[in-house]
């Protein structure tokens, strides 16, 4: 790296620094700025003149100061120790920073992403003398009770492996050597590095045809997301974007969850930090933190690191995908990421496109979401991994014509539309059932082993959406002429639609049972609501008065079905019998 | 030792370009000595080789290119602090304004502060009693929260902030409470009202004021909230006090920011505000909070006037994305002489659930506000219906809810600016108002709580 020269600063404007004398520099090389050692990244090159976005506060920096090129792009460390960590946007561990610096983040800190002092118990899974190539799993480390960390051959290495031994190693100790074809040895460690802006390769892309279950009724039943799929949640402030993201981070049936708090509130991250270790995974009973990685770049932290935080997050997620796991990444909020891009672009004096955003906004967003997907992982043994991306978008004034929303909708397959109107009625999650969509719905049937149940679920979902549609048409008429003037069957439809909204779609994130509903219970709950609808219509045919049907006590049971714990299924099943009994009693009167 | 430069190349808007400067650093401050000996202050916005772009806090009127001398002070803007700042009034950049002596600083702090490490934040979950029912009862404020007041021109946000400053206390023994007030571009009248009000009630003893009036230099406003927050951080995290920061009015602050941005010919975002408005506001608002292992806290109440009462205007919109809820003032309530005219339905405190309940306020608090909220929402609908159809056309039930809404507005919301209610009084008033309904109608309240609290109020109302 001797050809890399130290440059000199010629210009400072906020997070953007321009330096000259940077011969040999490459785009996106990481540099160290001034004696304060601020971390920056080259974003533009003209001859030996480089524009640098600096990830830390630049106050007190001026022309003439030195810039040193590290010659490497912005990279993250991948290996055991990622899980349970909380990082800033460029993978500096915030808990370690707190120990070394105190409560406020000072600039110029350098800390490795993975702890060097911790030993991990490594167990080889291949024998010495095996021919290995990139992506091959050669051993494993039980990182947390929930995660078996697979150690893979880094990309670009191929040859005969030797020196593998079971034992306790730190992440930077050599655990084996690979003799390459040219005769040289490559060291294998528990840790490897990867540049964040470059997607990690895989053997083959597969269609995302399995549903990622979330336990959120409106999502699973009507707008499901696939393992390896993409979704976006736009909405104005106060509509519960963050609560939706938190709920998904807690309940999705993924092996690893990466949560990126990008330019959002500090107190919200604290909430996640205090809550996750206490919450238990519904499947294993272990704390959810045992499968989570948090990246917190709050809105008061430097803007350039915010731009990087999304890439840091997705790279960690891809690494776990490569082990053959199902991974979900939540980015809250991608608007802040886009704004960071805009800020840097403005300082670079680039010609703006819409709303001052750079012309490459759409391309950047698209290529970010393209890093999702279900794949055949590189290397052996053969395995499949999936990476789903769920991005929150915060459009100004809730206006969906915003550039970031539009660019995102262009590429994502699921759209959960949050409405201020619903939030004001305290209907949460405030996902609008009429405007949201999902392209993965046909895969919902695949979640059920039993064909009958699968068909039933698809049918229930279809019928109830029909009723909700009908409600939106009828409601205008009712407002004008009153509910009494429409037909009894329509009244029943309205009442059932209301029941679907209030007793099914409405879900309380803070209630210990209601916060998560299994697909099986969802099928049962929705089935019960529609069973009442069906029986009600029959009764109307036989001359019963709608208002008598609506007044039946069993409706209270239907409304409370959401609070029945998963293991008390029989209570839920009993509701249908009660419906039969009470509707039957109406006939007695007739 | 400081070098002086007489090389001002150009002056435009609030900005000045100086050439031939050595060793200038981004973000540092400068003194500008004008031809007539007047000293003005500025901050470096950009350095390119030997050219330095400076924003002048006091504005550029009267600045001339030939005679002005510029001194680069080689440090960022700092504020000298000591416990003596309590009870004092300063300018928007931190110079004494009350005729008192200069502060002998214990400590000098950079006004830009440093971001709080998210890992070191402590979750805000301790109740602050403001004595205002609509806040304490329905949208509780907790220590370390940032809860803005969205107001409009002609609405009485000054009275409310004065009431907050006077009445806010934390529950618990041995806690010291302080108020830091930053005025940005408010009128002399409004500022004087606030100062007089605090002086008359003695609350000034525990307050620090930073005042930038409407006729003070607009650019100074960019520094004012940061100066005030630096003082607040000192009181909170150095002195262990519970600090309430009131920033009035953030819309003026944003306009000053827009002025600078326009002068620099930056690509504007929405309505001409700079694209980095969100980031900039966040660096102000996010300085609220609590820190692990530290006794003190900063709670923030920014006030902003929404142009044309439009909540989607960039200033309230971006504020709402950063703060933890909002208190919205309603024009129609104000017209009905409801004071303070807090529009309950769209107001929200995101952290309310964490700061109330048994041991913090009272066990019935959460159920009670849910019920009051639901009943009032229903009553409001009935009120609206009545204006279309006439009161007589309403069903008996609707009429009852409408009566409730009227009572609720008249007694619960409207308490006047000088009544200080304890949270227990607020909760009891809630029960009293709900006593016009049968127990069975109070679906949001746990039956056990109704049995425990309601009987007392049934007697008085029947």
Image (cartoon, coloured by chain):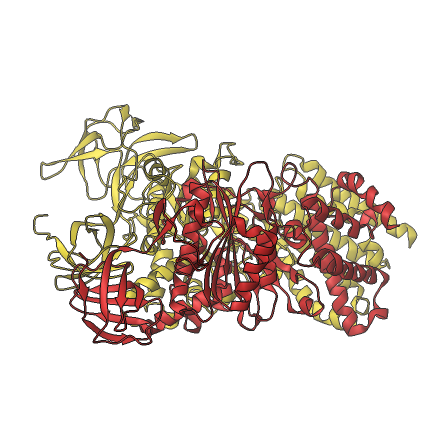
Chain colours: A yellow, B red
Image x and y of residue B186, in percent:
50, 67
Q: Position of residue A483 (x, y in %)?
A: 79, 66
Q: Position of residue A442 (x, y in %)?
A: 52, 55
| Viewer-nearest residue: B297 or B147 | B297
Q: Residue at x 51, y 35 (%)?
A: A278
Q: Position of residue A550 (x, y in %)?
A: 80, 55
Give whichever of B66, B175 is nearer the camera: B66
| Residue at the spot 44% in from the left edge and 50% down from the top edge | B85
Q: Quadrant of residue A514?
A: top right
- The answer to whether residue A88 is visible is no
Q: As rendered, which of B108 and A473 lies closer to the eye?
A: B108
Above or below B206: residue A435: below
Residue found farthest to the left:
A2
B27 up-or-down from A376: above or below? below
Residue B337 horizontal side relative to residue A438, left or right:
right
The answer to whether B288 appears left or right of A568 in the picture is left
Front position in the image: B63 or A277: B63
């Amino acid at each position: 790296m001797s050809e890399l020269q130290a440059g000199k600063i010629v210009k400072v404007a906020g997070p953007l620094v321009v330096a000259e004398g940077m011969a040999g520099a490459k785009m996106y090389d990481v540099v160290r700025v001034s004696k304060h050692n601020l971390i920056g990244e080259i974003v533009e090159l003209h001859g030996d003149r480089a524009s640098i976005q600096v990830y830390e506060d630049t106050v007190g920096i001026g022309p003439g100061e030195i810039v040193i090129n590290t010659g490497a792009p912005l990279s993250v460390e991948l290996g055991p120790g990622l899980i349970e960590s909380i990082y800033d946007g460029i993978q500096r561990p915030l808990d370690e920073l707190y120990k070394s610096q105190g409560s406020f983040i000072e600039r110029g800190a350098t800390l490795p992403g993975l702890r060097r002092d911790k030993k991990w118990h490594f167990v080889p899974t291949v024998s010495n003398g095996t021919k290995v190539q990139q992506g091959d799993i050669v051993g494993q480390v039980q990182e947390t009770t929930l995660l078996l960390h697979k150690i893979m051959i880094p990309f670009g290495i191929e040859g005969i492996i030797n020196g593998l031994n079971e034992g306790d190693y730190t992440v930077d100790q050599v655990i084996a050597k690979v003799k390459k074809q040219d005769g040289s040895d490559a060291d294998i460690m528990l840790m490897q590095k990867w540049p964040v802006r470059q997607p990690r390769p895989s053997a083959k892309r597969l269609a995302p045809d399995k549903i990622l279950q979330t336990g959120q009724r409106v999502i699973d039943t009507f707008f499901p997301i696939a393992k390896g799929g993409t979704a976006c949640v736009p909405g104005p402030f106060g509509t519960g974007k963050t609560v939706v993201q938190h709920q998904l981070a807690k309940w999705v049936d993924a092996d690893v969850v990466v949560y990126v708090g990008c330019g959002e509130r500090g107190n919200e991250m604290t909430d996640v930090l205090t809550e996750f270790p206490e919450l238990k995974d519904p499947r294993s009973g272990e704390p959810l933190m045992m499968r989570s990685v948090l990246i917190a770049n709050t809105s008061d932290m430097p803007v350039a690191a915010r731009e990087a935080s999304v890439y840091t997050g997705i790279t960690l997620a891809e690494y776990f995908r490569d082990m053959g796991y199902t991974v979900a990444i939540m980015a809250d909020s991608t608007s802040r990421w886009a704004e960071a891009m805009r800020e840097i672009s403005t300082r670079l004096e680039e010609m703006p496109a819409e709303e001052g955003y750079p012309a490459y906004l759409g391309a950047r967003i698209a290529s970010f979401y393209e890093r999702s997907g279900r794949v055949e992982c590189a290397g052996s043994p053969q395995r499949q991994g999936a990476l789903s991306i769920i991005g929150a978008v915060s459009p100004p004034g809730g206006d969906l014509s915003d550039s970031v929303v539009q660019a995102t909708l262009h590429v994502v397959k699921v759209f959960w539309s949050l409405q201020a109107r619903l939030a004001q009625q305290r209907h949460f999650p405030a996902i609008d059932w009429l405007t949201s969509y999902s392209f993965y719905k046909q895969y919902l049937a695949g979640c059920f082993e039993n064909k009958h149940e699968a068909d039933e679920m698809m049918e229930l979902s279809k019928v109830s959406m029909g009723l909700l549609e009908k409600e939106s048409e009828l409601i205008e008429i009712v407002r004008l002429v009153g509910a009494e003037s429409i037909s009894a069957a329509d009244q029943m439809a309205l009442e059932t639609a209301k029941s679907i909204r209030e007793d099914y779609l409405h879900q309380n994130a803070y209630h210990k049972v209601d916060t998560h509903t299994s697909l099986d219970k969802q099928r049962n709950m929705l089935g019960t609501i529609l069973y009442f609808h069906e029986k009600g219509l029959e009764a109307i045919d036989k001359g019963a008065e709608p208002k008598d049907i609506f007044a039946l006590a069993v409706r209270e049971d239907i409304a409370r079905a959401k609070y029945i714990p998963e293991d008390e299924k029989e209570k839920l099943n009993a509701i249908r019998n009660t419906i039969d009994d009470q509707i039957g009693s109406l006939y007695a009167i007739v | 030792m400081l070098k002086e430069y007489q090389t001002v190349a150009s002056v435009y808007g609030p900005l000045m370009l100086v050439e031939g400067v050595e060793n200038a650093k981004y973000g540092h401050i400068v003194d500008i000595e004008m031809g007539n000996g007047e000293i003005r202050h500025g901050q470096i916005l950009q350095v390119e080789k030997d050219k330095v772009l400076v924003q002048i806090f006091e504005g550029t009127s009267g600045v001339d290119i030939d005679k002005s001398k510029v001194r680069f002070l080689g440090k960022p803007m700092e504020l000298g602090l000591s416990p003596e700042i309590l009870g004092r009034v300063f300018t928007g950049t931190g110079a004494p304004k009350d005729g008192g002596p200069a502060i002998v600083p214990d400590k000098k702090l950079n006004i830009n502060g440093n971001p709080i490490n998210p890992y070191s934040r402590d979750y805000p979950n301790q109740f602050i009693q403001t004595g205002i029912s609509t806040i304490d009862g329905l949208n509780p404020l907790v220590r370390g929260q940032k809860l803005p007041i969205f107001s409009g021109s002609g609405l009485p946000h000054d009275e409310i902030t004065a009431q907050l400053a006077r009445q806010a206390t934390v529950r618990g023994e041995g806690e010291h409470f302080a108020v830091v007030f930053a005025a940005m571009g408010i009128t002399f009248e409004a500022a004087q009202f606030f100062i007089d009000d605090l002086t008359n009630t003695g609350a000034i003893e525990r307050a620090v004021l930073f005042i930038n009036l409407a006729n003070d230099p607009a650019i100074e406003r960019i520094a004012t909230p940061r100066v005030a927050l630096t003082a607040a951080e000192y009181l909170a995290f150095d002195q262990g006090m519970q600090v309430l920061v009131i920033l009035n009015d953030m819309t003026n602050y944003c306009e000053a920011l827009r002025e600078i941005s326009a002068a620099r010919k930056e690509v504007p975002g929405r309505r001409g505000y700079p694209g980095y408005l969100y980031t900039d506001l966040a660096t102000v608002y996010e300085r609220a909070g609590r820190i692990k292992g530290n006794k003190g806290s900063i709670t923030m109440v920014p006030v902003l006037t929404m142009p044309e009462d439009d909540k989607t205007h960039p200033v309230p919109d971006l504020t709402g994305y950063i703060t933890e809820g909002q208190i919205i003032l309603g024009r129609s309530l104000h017209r009905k002489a409801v004071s303070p005219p807090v529009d309950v339905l769209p107001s929200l405190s995101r952290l309310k659930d964490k700061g109330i309940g048994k041991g913090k306020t009272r066990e019935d608090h959460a159920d009670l506000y849910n019920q009051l909220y639901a009943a009032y929402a229903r009553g409001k609908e009935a009120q609206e219906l009545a204006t279309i159809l006439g009161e007589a056309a309403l069903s008996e039930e609707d009429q009852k809810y409408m009566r409730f809404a009227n009572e609720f507005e008249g007694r619960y919301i409207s308490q006047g600016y000088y009544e200080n209610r304890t949270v227990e009084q607020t909760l009891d008033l809630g029960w009293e108002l709900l006593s016009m309904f049968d127990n069975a109608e109070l679906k949001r309240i746990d039956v056990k709580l109704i049995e425990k609290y309601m009987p007392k109020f049934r007697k008085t109302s029947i």
